[in-house]
Image (spheres, rainbow, N blue to C red):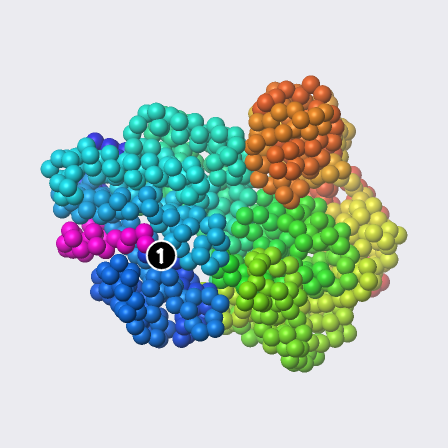
């Protein structure tokens, strides 16, 4: 005998032999203990008919008495008890109950006797409206939604599981009573006509019992319950509902399983990608009809059209998921939900004898949660994910065990527990602790990382880490291009706000939590970022001295073609943080950063309180002053059409005029974040901003906003940050005057004093521009030169040349070439370059930048070897970002019904359309809905199947050169990834890529001290 997860005999054997399996069974039985005590008639009566509306929230205003204080306990924090207080909600703040009437009596009257609608807060199911209010409070509908979602559906599922695990008839009977009643109602369930959300916000919103996304979980659990109950359904047991056994089985199949498949096919039951596909597989396995199974397997795997929801896996794995395993949803919490659902789909497909179409990418999807952890404990709160204080999002032990069984990878073994974690695990052989220990390998300390496809950089130094997101804004993303988070001393010190207060039609998410100003980034012209277009990585280096990344996002603001951020973590034992943000274009630039909850103070600047909000002295909190149409009670537009500043959400404003370097400090009992601002700005503001009202979030955070104004404005903002436990090391940070021969290089110089050490930092946008500062001449993009009383002690540079007294360096790029051809199966690229000047091993692990006039991509080099043409590079992942079925629509146009999900943000511009045999590569000009426009003729391109590739033959390939030096006494140790010429006090050495040593001529250090050659 089997169920949708496998053989019940295996599950019962596991329960018999393993204590943790018995604990899982005990949890199942305990969860239904109250339900088996209820009479059959009362069980059926507890299932509400379709005429009772549903709502996942009563109101975005909160409680009628306590308002938004309700949400401090969570968004869904009303207290309900269907067993003792049916149809009543209790406020967790004050304990009062709503609605004021006895809704059960009103329901028993057929929803007709309105004399039963008594008290101050009566609700007939369609909500109670406060006098003069635009929206209602939906007490009954909220109760009904959560009765279904948190009580009835779980009860049916667990009753069916209890029957399957024990064979006891009482569980089967109670489950049958409830399933029969649900099947009676299910075809008439229509969330579009029976819900608060469709009534008040979106007339087209779909679903069945609940909204169309959450309904995927409902129908999946109902389908499993039907499958589990099949052995129980006989002529004898079916009499409990007045049917014959075959008649009842067909009744459940028709009104639940087939109705569910119809809902998925028709768009009434669809969720984030993978949710409804997972549900459909459970349904077809529960149904057990070969013809239906074959049709749905073909649809789930091979359908090239049908929009986002219905595209087959063979296409979606390319079109919806970046090469590192993150989906287009942006937010890690949602991306990792895809991973879990697709893993379950792969498991179900295997049980049906079908291979998952791209297991290598699935493996990366399952590995990426660990890859992006900061400090080993925090997942960056990108988009609708996480909170100010949230920790990590990672694979569940059950998913880790599934992944380990599928891939046998040490990375999954480390996350796997021996034995059993969930009910599903019971149907699989146990994994022993010995097996896990043998398969596991010690996790190495993570270094700085770049996810170039997704658009995320994580810099990692000892005890200090920083993330920067530069990818597309899509799915559950925010308008936060080049936003950062900083982590230190085991905590978030510059946290993102994470998931908004609501993921629905409410004012604060688009106006504040998803808006640009609430993030650690720059606002141009007092409005949120104009587009969701991805930026591009410009620099990435990881060395013991410096972790460095630079990204630009020139399409983020239409009037700001320069929008570029450089971040670095500098130092070994006590690293500090550097942030340089350049903006060009527009007339107002506001650099916004905020710290963690704690005491706040400033030094070096006088700030004075002013009334109102950052939006103005006469603008009240939360008022959309720059889009007053949205403040009208009868507004016709969604709040999500708001493109304004969100500045009215910053209150308690203090302002000042920074006339010299100054600092801001956030201090808690365990940590101090100090940010020093060495560059001038016209104004500085300090204000309070509220994170979403969620458990664990502080009531407010303190923001610092630096502002410049002017026509055709160019701004450079800089911050030097230190995180310490009470006694900092950074004494000061000030601007360095830099002379430059190229205006567009936009040089920035900063000198940081740390104890007896001075760090001089130069940054330029032009690698060939000549910079002169503090007795140095530098050509390059980034330089760190540290010195003590004896002269230079440390150096890191990405550049061409440096001359500073007795120290001279000449170098170039580690790789400068052109793509010749691509081997897609091996993720390999053949590069034409000056091979004799290369050491292939020196660029392994480095980032290769591949670009043309329209596009830039970056890939980590897994391995490299010299070939006659130049170089063969194997990349960490291949560059395929699309798969489609198309047809020629002209010499330079292709028509397709395959959804290319990222087209709205110009993501495919400059990529290549490639035929199935990878013989014809054609550059893409743009992609619109259903139409691909090309930059060159198709020629003999073979259709119908085609791919989209991130790069192609003719693209430039570059690996940035870097060199690092450290002095100990008279000895210098160094590393370079390129050939370089190093001169120290007249002693010159041609160094090869790799590690090297040099010794100063005798007496150099003493001469430097005596001559006062310090910077």
Q: Is residue 739 left or right of residue 7?
A: right
Question: Image height check: is 253 above or below 964?
Answer: above
Residue 862 visible in the picture: no
Label the magenta part by its dominant secondary structure: helix
Quadrant location of residue 702?
A: bottom right
Quadrant location of residue 696?
A: bottom left
Residue occupying the point 33% across, 36% down: 258
Residue occupying the point 72% across, 49% down: 554
Question: Image height check: is 122 above or below 1003?
Answer: below
Density class for disc 1 (Cα within 10 Å; few <14, some 14-19, many ≥20) is: many
Which residue carries the number 1 mark? 53
**Residue nearer the viewer, 497 or 305:** 305
Q: Which quadrant is home to the C terminus? A: bottom right
Residue occupying the point 61% across, 34% down: 930
Q: Is residue 543 left or right of residue 310?
A: right
Q: How many numbered tags mark residues here?
A: 1
**Residue nearer the viewer, 459 or 320:** 320
| Rendering coords of residue 420 (x, y %) | 29, 43
Which region shows up in magenta?
24-51
Q: Which quadrant is home to the N terminus? A: top left
| Rendering coords of residue 832 (x, y %) | 74, 27
Q: Residue furthest left?
A: 236
Question: Image height check: is 219 above or below 743?
Answer: above
Magenta stretch: includes residue 624: no
| Rendering coords of residue 621 (x, y %) | 58, 73
| Rendering coords of residue 596 (x, y %) | 55, 67
Residue 467 visible in the picture: yes
Magenta stretch: includes residue 26: yes
Secondary structure type for disc 1: loop
**Residue nearer the viewer, 408 or 923:** 923
Q: Residue furthest right?
A: 741
Quadrant location of residue 383?
A: bottom right
């Amino acid at each position: 005998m089997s169920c949708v997860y496998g053989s019940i005999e295996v599950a019962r054997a596991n329960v018999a032999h393993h204590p943790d399996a018995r604990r899982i069974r005990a949890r199942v039985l305990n969860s239904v203990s109250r339900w088996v005590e209820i009479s059959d008639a009362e069980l059926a009566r507890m299932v509400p008919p379709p005429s009772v509306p549903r709502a996942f929230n009563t109101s975005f205003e909160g409680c009628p008495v306590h308002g938004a204080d309700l949400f401090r306990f969570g968004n869904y924090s009303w207290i309900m008890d269907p067993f003792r207080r049916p149809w009543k909600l209790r406020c967790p703040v004050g304990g009062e109950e709503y609605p004021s009437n006895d809704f059960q009596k009103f329901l028993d009257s057929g929803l007709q006797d309105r004399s039963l609608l008594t008290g101050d807060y009566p609700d007939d199911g369609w909500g109670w409206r406060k006098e003069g209010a635009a929206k209602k409070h939906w007490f009954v509908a909220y109760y009904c939604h959560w009765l279904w979602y948190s009580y009835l559906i779980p009860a049916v599922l667990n009753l069916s599981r209890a029957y399957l695990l024990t064979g006891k008839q009482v569980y089967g009977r109670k489950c049958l009573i409830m399933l029969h009643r649900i099947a009676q109602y299910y075809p008439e369930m229509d969330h579009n006509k029976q819900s608060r959300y469709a009534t008040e916000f979106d007339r087209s919103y779909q679903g069945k019992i609940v909204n169309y996304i959450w309904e995927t979980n409902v129908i999946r659990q109902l389908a499993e319950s039907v499958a589990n109950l099949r052995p129980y359904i006989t002529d004898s047991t079916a009499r409990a509902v007045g049917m014959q056994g075959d008649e009842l089985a067909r009744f459940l199949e028709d009104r639940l399983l087939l109705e569910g498949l119809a809902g998925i096919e028709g768009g009434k039951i669809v969720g984030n990608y993978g949710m409804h596909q997972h549900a459909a597989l459970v349904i077809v396995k529960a149904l057990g009809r070969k013809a239906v199974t074959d049709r749905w397997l073909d649809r789930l795997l091979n359908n090239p059209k049908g929009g986002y929801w219905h595209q087959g896996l063979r296409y979606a794995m390319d079109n919806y998921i970046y090469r590192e395993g993150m989906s287009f949803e942006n937010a890690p919490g949602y991306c990792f939900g895809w991973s879990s659902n697709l893993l379950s789909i792969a498991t179900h497909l295997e049980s049906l004898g079908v291979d998952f179409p791209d297991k290598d990418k699935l493996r990366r999807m399952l590995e990426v949660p660990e890859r992006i952890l900061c400090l080993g404990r925090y997942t960056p709160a990108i988009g609708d994910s996480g909170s100010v204080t949230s920790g990590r999002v990672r694979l569940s032990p059950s998913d880790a065990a599934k992944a380990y069984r599928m891939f046998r990878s040490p990375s999954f073994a480390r996350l796997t527990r021996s034995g059993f974690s969930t009910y599903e695990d019971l149907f699989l052989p146990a994994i022993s602790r010995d097996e896990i220990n043998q398969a596991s390998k010690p996790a190495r300390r993570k270094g700085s990382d770049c996810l170039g496809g997704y658009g995320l950089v994580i810099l990692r130094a000892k005890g200090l880490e920083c993330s920067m997101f530069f990818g597309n804004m899509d799915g559950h993303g925010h308008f936060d291009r080049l936003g950062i988070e900083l982590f230190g001393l085991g905590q978030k010190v510059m946290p993102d706000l994470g998931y908004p207060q609501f993921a629905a039609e409410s004012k604060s998410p688009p106006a504040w939590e998803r808006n640009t100003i609430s993030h650690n980034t720059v606002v141009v012209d007092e409005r949120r970022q104009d587009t969701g277009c991805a930026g591009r990585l410009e620099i990435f280096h990881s060395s013991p001295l410096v972790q460095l990344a630079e990204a630009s996002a020139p399409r983020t603001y239409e009037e700001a073609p320069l929008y570029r951020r450089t971040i670095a973590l500098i130092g070994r034992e006590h690293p500090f943080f550097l942030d340089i943000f350049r903006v060009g274009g527009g007339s107002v630039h506001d650099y916004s950063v905020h710290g963690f909850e704690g005491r706040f103070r400033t030094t070096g600047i006088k700030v004075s309180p002013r009334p109102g909000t950052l939006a103005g002295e006469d603008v009240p909190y939360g008022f959309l002053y720059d889009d007053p149409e949205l403040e009208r009670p009868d507004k016709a537009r969604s709040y999500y059409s708001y493109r304004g500043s969100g500045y009215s959400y910053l209150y308690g404003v203090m302002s000042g005029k920074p006339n010299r370097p100054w600092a801001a400090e956030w201090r808690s009992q365990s940590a101090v974040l100090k940010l020093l601002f060495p560059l001038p700005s016209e104004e500085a503001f300090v204000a309070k901003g509220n994170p979403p009202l969620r458990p664990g979030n502080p009531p407010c955070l303190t923001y610092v906003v630096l502002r410049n104004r002017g026509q055709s404005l160019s701004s450079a903002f800089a911050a030097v940050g230190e995180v310490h436990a009470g006694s900092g090391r950074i004494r000061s940070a000030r601007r360095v005057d830099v002379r430059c021969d190229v205006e567009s290089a936009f040089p920035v110089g900063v000198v940081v004093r740390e104890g007896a050490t001075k760090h001089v930092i130069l940054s330029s946008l032009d690698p060939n521009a000549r910079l002169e500062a503090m007795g140095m001449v530098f050509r390059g993009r980034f330089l760190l030169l540290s010195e003590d009383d004896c002269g230079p002690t440390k150096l890191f540079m990405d550049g061409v040349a440096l001359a500073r007294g007795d120290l001279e360096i000449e170098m170039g790029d580690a790789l400068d070439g052109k793509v010749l051809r691509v081997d897609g199966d091996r993720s390999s690229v053949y590069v034409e370059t000056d091979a004799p000047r290369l050491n292939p091993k020196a660029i392994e692990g480095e980032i290769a930048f591949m670009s043309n006039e329209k596009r830039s991509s970056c890939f980590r080099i897994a391995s490299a070897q010299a070939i006659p043409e130049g170089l063969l590079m194997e990349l960490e992942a291949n560059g395929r970002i699309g798969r489609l079925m198309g047809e020629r629509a002209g010499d330079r146009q292709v028509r397709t019904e395959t959804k290319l999900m990222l087209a709205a943000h110009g993501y495919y511009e400059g990529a290549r359309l490639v035929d199935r045999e990878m013989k014809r590569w054609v550059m893409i000009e743009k992609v619109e809905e259903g139409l691909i426009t090309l930059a060159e003729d198709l020629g003999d391109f073979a259709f119908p199947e085609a791919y989209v590739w991130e790069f192609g033959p003719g693209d430039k390939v570059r690996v940035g050169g870097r060199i690092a030096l450290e002095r100990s006494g008279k000895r210098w140790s160094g590393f370079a990834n390129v050939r370089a010429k190093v001169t120290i006090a007249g002693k010159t050495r041609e160094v090869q890529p790799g590690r090297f040593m040099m010794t100063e001529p005798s007496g150099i250090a003493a001469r430097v001290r005596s001559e006062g050659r310090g910077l």
